[in-house]
């Protein structure tokens, strides 16, 4: 294990000798998907949630085909949960966990047309939960009157309920097109597969995994000229 | 290309499978007959269906329960029901758990195996110990053997119920048949013809047996008195003779309120009932919408994963508030559930509409959350896989309209009446009623 770490570190140091560096900005749509393991309930339906994501991507191009990509990413993983009793819609609850994350992927790219490149990549991400938001509508549970009052709130994570750490695998593909000297426009599609339970674990807890699918548009500036 | 596609699918499937599986060691098998597995099943069902972990010092307290008791139950090696000593030991553990860890005052843990049956409820245990000065060992013996004890039967918790009030205070026998009732004592109290008392016994509707009494009367100095046994009357409003009688009594509220100088609402011994009935009763007193409480239930099986607090708003029926007259509500240790929420409604009317409402008597039961089966609101009443234990528990947390939780604590009255005295009560000296009328007359005359 130690040798592996030393090797990776050496490779990391060696990269700048051969690589060129890009930095940029991207933003786009994020669709969250909740996967619950073992806590399913009757007439309770989970649906994808919708939010946005943005990041400051950085790219180290090893050669004309391979690059290591990282950066700082804000990612909101949202989901919707609806509960029904007979025909009555008891609540519609929307929640989003807000993370600051560090993604790292290895990309393979190839030119497909003049100035246009396509790429695919895989890697992982690690992050921290820093905020939660929820909004929705409830029905009276006591008086049985369907008044559907709405609510929305922002709150800090609850250390008794939430797992602050987020980590998982990342799969991406996209296109980049040279639009100006050193500037490339990027379209990125990615899927985050969460490997960490979004809830704190204890005996008998129900794991919840929040994946997300995102589509982002961005711009990258390459130091050292375009290839 | 096909091979690459299949490989990608295989990798994706493998990666999805990498996610941690549920904690299957917490899920009991469908069939078992040992105490340790029964406890694991009970612990797991509570873990997923109990809504009051947020009221404990720490949500991890339930883990402490597992760590402490699993090994103790594991020492009981004979199959359930085959060893009397082990049965008693096991049920003592459940007694300790219920009396020490459960905040829900609707909670009722029932163990049943053949002829052996025991019921454990936090309010009963607390009152038995407090009112009679008993230890946990003595209390457990009482509940284990279900002994009938005269001094327990004569406590406020057990004796000061509506039917006994009707009998002792008003001389009305409500225990047989059904229909209107009257008595000489009630004639003296209200004036002949100035009251209506309706009684229903053992009426079966849809497989459920209903018992109900209501007494509404106007005293000679125009104080409206309403005593209602429970809030289970909504199911009784099915159009038959009983329904018509009850409907007429409720319809008389408006006329009575227009002429009354004060109102006394007697909720002693009222264990609650149906929330629709609660609405029907209170809607007669005010107009428009009043927020009376907030509730929340569970979003998932995780202990502290709650829905957002939902405002519970009651809509009044008349075109005005009957706020120009004083009210007194009488409560006791057995005023629970919808009856206890009635006190919260009164507080809301006081807070939001300026009603003059005073509660008199003794602290209520501290059972506020609504009761349903867990399949309805994803929390609440449940049972172990092998039907040894049934767990009755609320599905919903409830707090007052100004954000206070009374669950497990009860609501203190504004004016505490003298301690319940059975000999006085049984001889017709109704201390709490006398206090209530003293208070209301004082307000009217000031």
Image (tube, grey):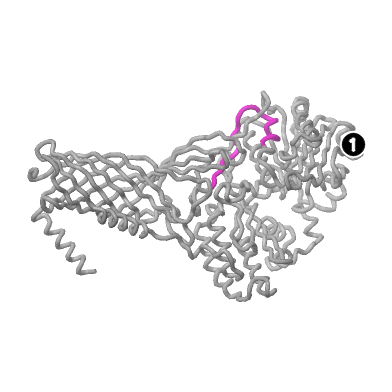
Q: Is residue B137 above or below residue A14?
A: below
Q: How many marks?
A: 1
Residue at the image point whose x is 88% and y is 32% from the top:
B191
Q: Residue furthest right?
A: B184
Q: Residue at x 35, y 40 (%)?
A: A51
- Percent x, y for residue B17? 37, 59
Q: Is residue B427 above or below residue B34?
A: above
The residue closer to the viewer here, B67 or B262, is B67
Q: Is residue B281 magenta?
A: yes
Say left or right for A153 vs B309. left
Circle 1: element type: helix
From the image, tell me which residue sits under label 1: B188
Residue pictured at 67% horizontal, 63% vertical: B111
Q: B355 or B185, which lies in front?
A: B185
As drawn, the residue found furthest toward the top would be B319
Which residue is nearer to you in this view: B292 or B234?
B234
Check the image and report above or below for A99 versus B328.
below
How would you rate the neighbour count of disc 1 (Cα within 10 Å): few for under 14, some for 14-19, many for 20 or more?
few
Residue B418 visible in this rendered orientation of the protein: yes
Q: Can you say which quadrant of the picture contains the N terminus of chain A?
A: bottom left
Question: Residue B428: image x %, image y %?
Answer: 86, 46
Magenta part of the chain: B279-297
Q: Position of residue B21 (x, y in %)?
A: 42, 60
Residue B127 image offset from top left, x and y in percent? 71, 57
> Which quadrant, please, contains the C terminus of chain A?
top left
The answer to whether residue A95 shows anywhere in this view is no
Chain where mark 1 sits: B
Question: In the shown orientation, is residue A176 left or right of residue B80?
Answer: left
């Amino acid at each position: 294990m130690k040798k592996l770490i030393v090797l990776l570190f050496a490779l990391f140091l060696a990269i700048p000798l051969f690589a060129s560096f890009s930095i940029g900005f991207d933003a786009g749509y994020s669709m969250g998907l909740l996967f619950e393991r073992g806590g399913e309930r009757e007439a309770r339906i989970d649906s994808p949630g919708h939010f946005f994501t943005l990041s400051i991507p950085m790219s180290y191009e090893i050669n004309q085909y391979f690059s290591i990509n990282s950066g700082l990413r804000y990612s909101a993983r949202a989901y919707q949960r609806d509960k029904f009793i007979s025909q009555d819609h008891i609540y519609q609850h929307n929640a989003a966990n807000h993370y600051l994350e560090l993604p790292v992927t290895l990309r393979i790219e190839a030119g497909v047309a003049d100035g246009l490149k396509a790429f695919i990549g895989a890697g992982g991400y690690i992050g921290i939960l820093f905020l939660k938001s929820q909004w929705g509508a409830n029905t009276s549970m006591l008086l049985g009157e369907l008044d559907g009052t709405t609510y929305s709130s922002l709150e800090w994570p609850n250390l008794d309920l939430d797992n602050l750490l987020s980590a998982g695998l990342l799969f991406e593909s996209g296109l980049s097109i040279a639009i100006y000297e050193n500037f490339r426009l990027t379209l990125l599609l990615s899927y985050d597969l969460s490997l960490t339970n979004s809830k704190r674990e204890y005996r008998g807890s129900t794991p919840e995994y929040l994946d997300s699918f995102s589509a982002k548009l961005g711009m990258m500036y390459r130091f050292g000229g375009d290839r | 290309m096909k091979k690459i596609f299949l490989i990608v699918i295989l990798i994706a499937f493998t990666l999805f499978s990498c996610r941690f599986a549920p904690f299957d060691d917490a899920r009991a098998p469908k069939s078992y007959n040992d105490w340790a597995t029964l406890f694991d099943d009970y612990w797991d069902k509570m873990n997923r269906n109990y809504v009051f972990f947020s009221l404990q010092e720490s949500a991890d307290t339930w883990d402490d329960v597992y760590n402490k008791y699993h090994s103790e139950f594991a020492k009981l090696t004979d199959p359930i029901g085959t060893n009397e000593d082990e049965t008693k030991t096991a049920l003592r553990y459940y007694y300790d758990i219920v009396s020490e860890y459960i905040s829900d005052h609707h909670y009722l843990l029932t163990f049943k195996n053949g002829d052996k049956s025991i019921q454990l409820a936090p309010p009963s245990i607390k009152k038995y110990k407090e009112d009679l000065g008993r230890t946990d060992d003595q209390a457990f013996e009482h509940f284990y053997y279900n002994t009938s004890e005269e001094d327990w039967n004569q406590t406020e918790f057990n004796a000061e119920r509506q039917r006994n009030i009707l009998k002792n205070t008003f001389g009305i026998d409500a225990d047989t048949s059904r229909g209107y009732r009257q008595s000489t004592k009630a004639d003296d109290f209200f004036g002949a013809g100035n009251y209506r008392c309706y009684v229903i016994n053992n009426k079966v509707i849809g497989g459920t047996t209903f018992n109900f009494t209501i007494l509404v009367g106007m005293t000679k100095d125009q104080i409206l008195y309403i005593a209602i046994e429970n809030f289970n009357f909504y199911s009784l409003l099915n159009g038959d003779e009983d329904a018509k009688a009850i409907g007429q009594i409720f319809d008389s509220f408006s006329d009575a309120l227009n002429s009354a100088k004060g109102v006394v609402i007697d909720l002693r011994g009222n264990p609650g009932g149906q929330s629709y009935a609660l609405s029907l009763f209170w809607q007669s007193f005010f107009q428009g919408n009043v927020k009376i409480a907030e509730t929340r239930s569970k979003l998932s099986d995780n202990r502290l994963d709650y829905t957002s607090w939902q405002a519970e708003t009651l809509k009044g029926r008349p075109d005005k508030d009957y706020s120009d007259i004083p009210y007194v509500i009488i409560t006791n240790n057995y005023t629970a559930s919808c009856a206890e929420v009635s006190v919260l409604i009164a507080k809301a009317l006081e807070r939001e509409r300026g009603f003059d409402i005073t509660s008199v008597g003794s602290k209520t039961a501290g059972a506020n959350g609504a009761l349903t089966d867990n399949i309805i609101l994803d929390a609440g009443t449940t049972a172990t896989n092998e039907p040894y234990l049934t767990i009755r528990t609320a599905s919903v947390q409830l707090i007052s309209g100004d954000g206070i939780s009374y669950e497990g604590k009860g609501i203190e009255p504004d004016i505490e009446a003298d301690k319940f005295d059975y000999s006085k009560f049984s001889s017709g000296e109704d201390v709490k009623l006398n206090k209530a009328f003293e208070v209301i007359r004082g307000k009217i005359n000031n």
